[in-house]
Amino acid sequence: MLAYHRRLLAFDHWANLETLAAVTPIAARVPQSVAWLAHIMAAKRLWFARVAGTTPPFTVNPALGVDALRAEFVTAHDEWQDLLATRADADLAGIVRYQNTRGDAFESTLGDILTHLPIHGQHHRGQIAAHLRVSSGVPPVIDFIHAARSGHLAVTP
């Protein structure tokens, strides 16, 4: 199962970079799309901090430009890959205790968090695709099956 989650995170990373590449040339015209991308990245970093027991580097909606976002997406991907390299399948059932942004206490399994991340990202990437269409932009093809067929889901051990 851990290999499956690592593959989904590889998809998530690829889809984020594809979406960022589509937004970058028209970023000034689509600030909401840039904001959604910043939110996707910040959520990945926030969830990592919760799992790792560290302080998140951002609020959930940071104001970042496209250049900073590219670097932060790479950082987010690398930190998740490094963490998962130290985990085993049995760790997916482990409980992560955390507080949401309002301070409410929750607990979730690592597996549920790893499932949440790409689904959360795809939700907002769908919003971005719709926003690009009405803003004369061209949304990227970011279907999972396209990424799988195109070889974009390679995961390093």
Image (cartoon, rainbow, N blue to C red):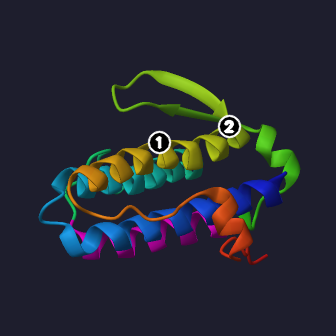
Residue located 42% across and 21% down the image:
104
Secondary structure of residue under mark 1: helix
Mostly what secondary structure, the magenta segment?
helix
Separation of marks 1 and 2 at Cα, in angstroms: 16 Å
Residue holding disc 2:
112
Task: Provide residue 56's location: percent of width, then percent of height.
Answer: 39, 51
Q: Is 60 in the magenta?
A: no
Quarter of the image holding residue 23? bottom left
- Above or below, 90 against 141 in this view is above
User: In the picture provided, is 97 more to the left or to the right than 43?
Assistant: right
Q: Residue 3 or 148: which is nearer the viewer? A: 148
Judge left or right: residue 137 versus residue 89: left
Using the rendered image of the protein, determine whether residue 56 is visible from the camera's viewpoint.
no
Q: What residue type is labelled 2?
A: Asp
Q: Looking at the figure, which quarter contains the C terminus?
A: bottom right
Instruction: Check the image and report above or below for 50 versus 68.
Output: above
What residue span does the magenta drawing correspond to?
65-82
The label on residue 123 is: 1
Q: What residue type is labelled 1?
A: His
Where is residue 107 drawn, in percent x and y?
Answer: 61, 27
Do tag 1 and tag 2 residues touch (Cβ < 8 Å)? Answer: no
* 30 relative position to 121: left or right: left
